[in-house]
Image (tube, rainbow, N blue to C red):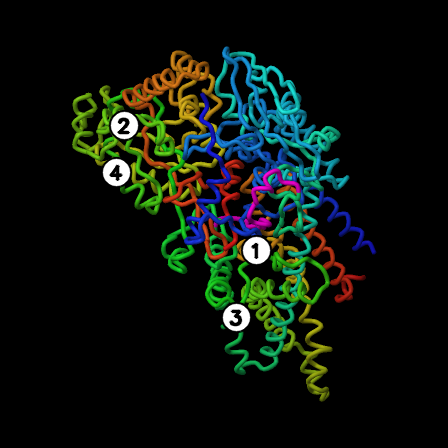
Amino acid sequence: MRPKTRPHFILTATCAALLTGPALAQTPAQGGTLTVPIIAPTLTDDFNPFSNAQEDMVRGTMFEPLWVHNVMTREVEFRLAEGFDYADDLTSMTIRLKDGLTWSDGEVLDAEDVAFSLALGQTDAALDKSGKWSDGLIAGVAVVDPLTVRINMSRPDSTLDWYLEPAFIVPQHIWADVEDKLTFRNPNPVGSGPITEVVSAQSNQIEICRNPNYYRAAEGLPFLDCIRFRQYSDNSQIQPALMAGEIDWGANFIADIDRTFVARDPENHRYWYPPNDLINLYVNTARAPFDNADVRRAMSMAMDREAIVDLAGYGYPTVATRATGLGDYFEAWLNDDLDAEFESLLTYDPDAANALLDQAGYLDSNGDGRRELPDGTPIGFDIHVVNGWTDWIQSAQIIAENLADIGITAQVRSVDWSVYDAALKEGTYDASMSWSLAAVDPIQTYNDYYHPDRVGQSWHAGHGMASDDLGALIDAYGQTTDEAERRDILDRLMTFTGENLPFIPLFSNPTWYQYNSTRIGGWPTAEDPFVQPVFYSAGRKLIAFERLYQK
Amino acid sequence: MAFVIRRLAFYLVAVFVAITFNFLIPRLMPGDPVDAMFAAAGGRMPPETIAAYREMLGFVDAPLWQQYLQYLRSVLMLDLGPSIMMFPTPVTTVLAGTLPWTVLLAGAATVLAIGIGCGFGLYAAYHRGGRVDRFAPVIWQFAASMPQAVTALAMFFIFALTLGWFPLGFGFNPNLRPGWSLDFVASVVMHAVLPLLTLLISMIATWVFTMRNAMVNVLGEDYIAMARAKGLPTNRIMRRYAARNAILPVVTAASMALGFAVAGQVFVETVFNYPGIGQLIVRAVAARDYPLMQACFLLIVLGVLAANFIADMLYVWLDPRLRS
């Protein structure tokens, strides 16, 4: 039922060999150091995966997940676990661990450790990285045998595996005695990941090196010896650091990247910006004029998305071409037939937009060039954008100009984060630019758009279209493992979105990813997209790291 | 003595007022730091988890006066709580790591600026109408009138990024271990050059003017004419008669400058990623890290007040009229 992983090591070796050229199927030699940036005011010697101090530094490198959902390949890549199965009635999940797992201090990693780690969230909501204790799904965790853990659920669910990825497995023999697990600095970290040994820790750099007892050491992994995490306070410092070759892996916005970064060394200075979350203009369908679907459709058709992407986004984002609420990030799930049906809604056509508004009765009755509501009130609203998010402010300005072309007056209002945040959550905005969830499965995105439970909680359900019917449909997805049934549910949600257009898709954010191959090879690229190259996802970072090698 | 006690009482009241404002201002700002903290979680985090964090970080809905009493107690105990950005690192640890760098940079810049600036001022005043008097103040003023951020970026772009003479950032080379080794000290010096130059460029003009004008005033006084008439050596007149009196306004300005030095470093530290308090304040405000913000502001206020107090005491020593 679940896709099996490919034998990971063979893949790693061949891929690396392909990149190095003629050296046929040869495993890269071990050695070398990768330097990556961490955005923080200062680094501290805190190696606790549950604290916020520098989670990007230890999650996925020192502490491994059970498995990783690879959105690029739509496969599950197993790490500590060998596999998992849901019971036939979907009220429990059995996790099988790999044999021969060890901690970096040489102790055996077994089901006790896994059960202990998963159960942490039961007593302390702040440790509940899966969020599934808090929402009542997980009823209990039991050790079946040293290599098997069973999770009992309070209701049928087939999606728990998506949420367990950020739940980190920590050694019971160390953490059981820790009283306050959130503030524990974990000064002598013991983990199961490829790098665990802290060589130096100072305010501007922390160096962590290979795990002497790594369970994949026999395969020659990891190829690299160490990772140096360098402290930078913001993006603008990372750009010169990349240009000067101080760091190997960037994951941040870089202005005019072709000229400032690539041109310095076109051979080694590279970037790849695969699509990430979809950015939408959310409108409040409870208010006029957004309560009329024709107005929403006309607004969508009036938007020149190419101009928005080129002018405001430096050409890095991907123009949204689907009205079904999903971006290119979910390419593997898209339904081209359905998308074709609604394609015209996202095609720039101000004439059609004008015609649609005329037909719907939103006319310019007093001749001032601006349309009024049928009752004569002039149309005017604010588009909320966060202060200082310059690319979005520019996008909203272009949108306002586009809308002016069809006689609709909109003002861009850049507001403080807290105002933006509260207005989106409480649904008290007219129009607001925001992202959408780029999760493991598109149903999570739809859940965030339409589930009544998300109203008031999420930023994206406040548009007024969430309903119990849609919520039930979304819930049904999690109660089946049948692909056809799931496909049908997704199609219905896509159709609903296309027909009603509760929000207006604009573009897909890029995944910021730059790399310098002067010292290090094996990077994910557009030609070899083996993983989405994001540094903030523990699992995907781990997959990428294990392919990297010193040149 | 009565003067000293009166001043001390005044400073105690000032500290109390400052602490109170320090408590109130962040709480009057809109928004909740815990929400900002989890903005990146994209709404995936369950509300229960966020509530748990909120409680742990002390953002409970207690009445303001209770929070205030709690705050007063923690300030007295020097227990300023954990930083939110770098949770669970205590604020005091964060400050202990950054304060020395700011003191080093600000201290060196202020002392050098006063020394160099007063030197120019003194020389210009004594040789009125000379080449130094005509050009130095103008040139320094021109340099100082550029916004500090522009100066810092220009320095960074030319000397660090393009020419590569100086490092791009940090207080020292991250690959070195801190210690009293020659390598490390040399690295600290190399990393301080550009930030220090930037600060000096923007600071020196003030001192040239302050010193020059004070000297010009004093040199017009009768007792200087008297000294000259008596045939005292120029050097002696300059140093014993004129400079000592001209230094009074410089003392006032210097005490203010030292106190505000931290705040003046914001741009420089941000551009050069220098590990000081200036840049920490910016990050703390952006992240709504109340405990850290409050600690930084408290430090600045205490610094300004302490510097003023020292200036008061210096006045007592320099100006005999205050002692009566």
The location of residue B156, given as percent across then percent down, is: 50, 62
Whether residue A350 sits left or right of residue B21 in the image: it is left
Whether residue A300 sits left or right of residue B184 in the image: it is left
Chain letter of disc 3? B
Q: Are marks 3 and 2 in contact (CB under 8 Å)?
A: no
Chain letter of disc 4? A
Mark toward the start of the polypeptide (1 vs 3): 3
Magenta span covers which residues?
A213-235
| A229 is within the stretch colored magenta | yes
Tell which of B126 and B79 is nearer to you.
B79
Looking at the rendering, which quadrant does residue B213 occupy? bottom right
| A467 is within the stretch colored magenta | no
Please determine if labels 4 and 3 lie on a single subunit: no
The location of residue B165, given as percent across then percent down, is: 53, 68
Chain letter of disc 1? B
Please determine if labels 2 and 1 lie on a single subunit: no
Chain letter of disc 2? A
**Does residue B290 appear anywhere in the picture?**
no
Label 2: how many Cα within 10 Å (few below 14, some 14–19, many 20+): few
Label 1: how many Cα within 10 Å (few below 14, some 14–19, many 20+): many
Label 4: how many Cα within 10 Å (few below 14, some 14–19, many 20+): many
Whether residue B267 sits left or right of residue A445 in the image: it is right
- As measured in the structure, the alpha-carbon distance from the residue carrying label 4 to the one carrying label 2 is 22 Å
Mark toward the start of the polypeptide (4 vs 2): 4
- As measured in the structure, the alpha-carbon distance from the residue carrying label 2 to the one carrying label 1 is 52 Å
The mark found on residue B269 in the picture is 1
> According to the image, label 3 marks what residue?
B140
> According to the image, label 4 marks what residue?
A304
Mark 2 element type: helix
Which amino acid type is marked by label 1? Glu
